[in-house]
Image: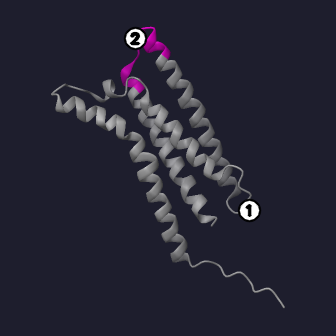
Amino acid sequence: MAAEPEVAPDRGEVGAAVREKLLRWAFFGVVFAVLPIIFNAVSAVSRNQNISLYVLLSHGELLLVSAGISAASGGELFGSEEPTFRQTRLFLVGMSFLIVCGASLWFADIAAANRANEILNRGFVAIGQLAVFGCSTVTGGCSIILSGLKQ
């Protein structure tokens, strides 16, 4: 008896599955990871304290969030033997690896500077963290989408 050919999934079904996976990642992987920073800001505002973005992000917490996002999303693609989008997968895994390493090292440096009571350029630290966070979320989102396409 001959084996029946595999039926390709419907594009609409694949799109819905990818959107669901991306939404799940966005809420549970990104929003919940940022909640402690948001709660810190809400706490300061509710106590009528003046808090700037520079002060809020001066300890590097967003770098840890970025490293976690990149590690998790890069892990979705790492070691995949899928023949489609190989170069894109390699690029995204490489970017995730660079973000994890760079964010972790920068956080360690910021923590060491804070322990030593060294003066940091808070503006650069805050804006830099936002840039790293943006890169990690874009790279992570693309990784999640690509991992959903291989199903």
119 magenta-colored: yes
In the picture, residue 126 is in which quadrant? top left
Element under disc 1: loop
Is 28 situated above or below 4?
A: above
The residue furthest left is: 48
Q: Which residue is mark 1?
A: 83
Where residue 92 sits: x, y (%)? 61, 48
In this rendering, does residue 66 appear at all? yes
- Is mark 2 in CB contact (under 8 Å) with mark 1? no
Q: Alpha-carbon distance for marks 2 and 1?
A: 50 Å
Relative side of 85 to 105, left or right = right
Segment tinted magenta in the rendering: 112-125
| Residue 119, disc | 2
Where 148 sits versus 49, above or below?
A: below
Left or right: residue 38 versus residue 130 is: left
Label 2's element? loop
Scheme of image coloration = one colour
Image x and y of residue 113, in percent = 46, 13
Q: Is residue 136 left or right of residue 78?
A: left
Kindly identify the amino acid type of the residue bearing the numbered disc 1.
Pro
- Residue at x-position 83% and y-position 89%: 2
